[in-house]
Every structure is written in structure tokens, then in C-alpha cells.
Image (cartoon, rainbow, N blue to C red):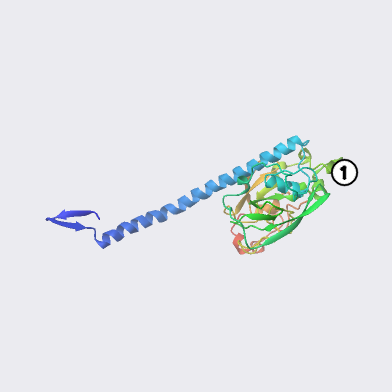
Amino acid sequence: MTSTRTGGRERGFTLIELLVVISVIALLLALLMPALNRARNQARKVVCRSNLRQFGSVLLMYVEDNDGRLPLGNATALWLLRGSLKGELQDPNVPDVFQNLGMDRAALCPMAVRSGTRYGFSTTLTINDERAFQVKGILGSRDKAWKITSPDPEFLGSYGFNFMLFDTFLGSGFLSARTTWKSLLSGLKILTVRNTSKVPVLLDSSDPGCRTHPGDTPPKDEDMRPLSMHYCIDRHKGRVNGLFLDWSVREVGLKELWTLPWYPNFDTAGPRTIAGGVQPEDWPQWMRGFKDY
């Protein structure tokens, strides 16, 4: 303890003086913590966008090697997401069919790196509309990653694909009237898509991917499982990050999700948009303060 000498006697800090110093330090920390948290969250947001750009680069390389077409089948999209690309019609349960693209780190938003535990899922994925298999796992949330538990190996991810782009039947609406059935079976050709900067490909999500519809409902509570719109999670202060079909990356407001053209006939002026007459009470309480679109 620091001391001073007064009149030949040593004098230490009094209890009141120590309490004053501690109070000042506590006050400074209280003032600094919000700024530090904002800086940390901003850094995480930058990393999240960088991850999405990496996936955009992978998809762009695939498209350039495949006559300008996206991979066909939501299963193929999923394997690209987990950093592995299987051969044509190969069952992912068969070992040694993957090429490791080393995307494990990029598959996780820094805001959601630990596995969810509350809700399981099971879905059937297809390969070129000819081979179907089951994928099982655990859904994520705002701050939790989803996890694939089967088929092996287990895999964690924080982003989800717009499966409409990889579906032969629903995705075919993006193509021109001159498109033949044979070309449909080759995957969606990006050059035939209009307004690619508005078409979402990959976003922050509680699920590896889903098919989005205008009637999808947001979760009643921000920590609840999204029943349909799996991208509606408050991961970045009322927004999520997204990769679009022109390979750009930007923030998307949670209410903006209902205005994006997920597929050609998607009603971007549906009941949950300003154009569709949405009212504040139409949103759950936790979303009412977010920007309307």
C-alpha cells in the first residue's frame, strides 16, 4: 500500500479513498464496455461478411466450370456449404466421395459458433432429382449454429441456402420460355435471371436451407425456433448478412426478408410488407422496433 510520511509518521490510504478509486475505475469500465462491445460486434460482422464472400467465390468457380449454371439439387448445395463436393449421383453416406474445400471455418458466423441443442430436424435432400437421402441434425438459433449429425461427418454451420435456386421444379421459373427440359436438368443458368442483386443465395440462418414463401411467419419470441422463415433471427441487431446472386454481400433487415424475390413468382408485396399493408401489431413484439420495408 502506498504511504506518505507526515510529521514523522507514515500515513496509508484511507478506506474512503480506496472506495473512491475503485468507484472511478468501475465508472470508466462502465463507460468503455458498450464501446468495446460495439467494436467487437462490428468485427464479428465483418468476419461474417467475409465468410459469405468466400462461399460466393466457391459458387462462382463452380458456375464458371459448369456453363454458367448453379449445381442442381439441394443436396449438392448443402455439400458445397459444408466444403465438400460429391460426384454425380454419389450417395453422401458412401465414404471417400468428397473433395475437401476447407470451408469449415467459413461456415460459421462468429456470432453463432456453438451448436444448438433444443430442436432436431430431419429432411430429405435430392441429387439431380434422382437420388434422395435423409439428413438429420439440430437446428440453430440467433446465437447458435445448426449441426448435421447424419450422414457423417458431423458438421456445424451458421448459414442457410435459398433452396429454391437449386430445385428443378420451383427454380425453373427463373429460366426463359425457350429453356428445354434437358437444360432444366443441368441446373439454373444465372444469365437467365433478372435482378440478380436482389435474389438471395445464402444468409445467416438457423437451418442449412429452406424454401421460403410469402406466408411464412416469424418466431413469436427472438429465442424461439423459427417455424418457417429460418433466416428471421436477430443475429446482427435487427439484420442478417446475405450473399446474393450477383455475388455481392450486404445486410438484410429482418422485415426486408419478405420483400426479396426468393423465386420468380414470390409476392414481394405480400401481407408482411408496407406495400401489402402490414401493421405494427402484425409483427411479434420483439420485431416491432425494426425497420419496415
x, y (%) of residue 30? Answer: 41, 56
Quick check: 188 left or right of 49?
right
Looking at the image, can residue 293 be seen?
Answer: no
Above or below 184: residue 205:
below
Q: Position of residue 139 (x, y in %)?
A: 66, 58
Which element is circle 1 on? Answer: helix
Quadrant of the snapshot with the N terminus = bottom left
- Evaluate whether residue 133 shows in this view: yes
| Camera-nearest residue between 218 and 203 | 203
Question: What residue occupies the far left of the structure in this picture?
Answer: 7
Residue at the spot x=64%, y=41% of the render? 54
Q: Position of residue 176 (x, y in %)?
A: 83, 41
Which residue is under mark 1?
181
Q: Position of residue 62 (x, y in %)?
A: 73, 38
The answer to which image quadrant residue 71 occupies is top right
Question: Label 1 is placed on what type of residue?
Answer: Trp
Tell me what residue is drawn at x 26 percent, y 62 percent: 15
Horizontal side, residue 243 vs residue 7: left or right? right
| Relative depth, front residue between 136 and 63 | 136
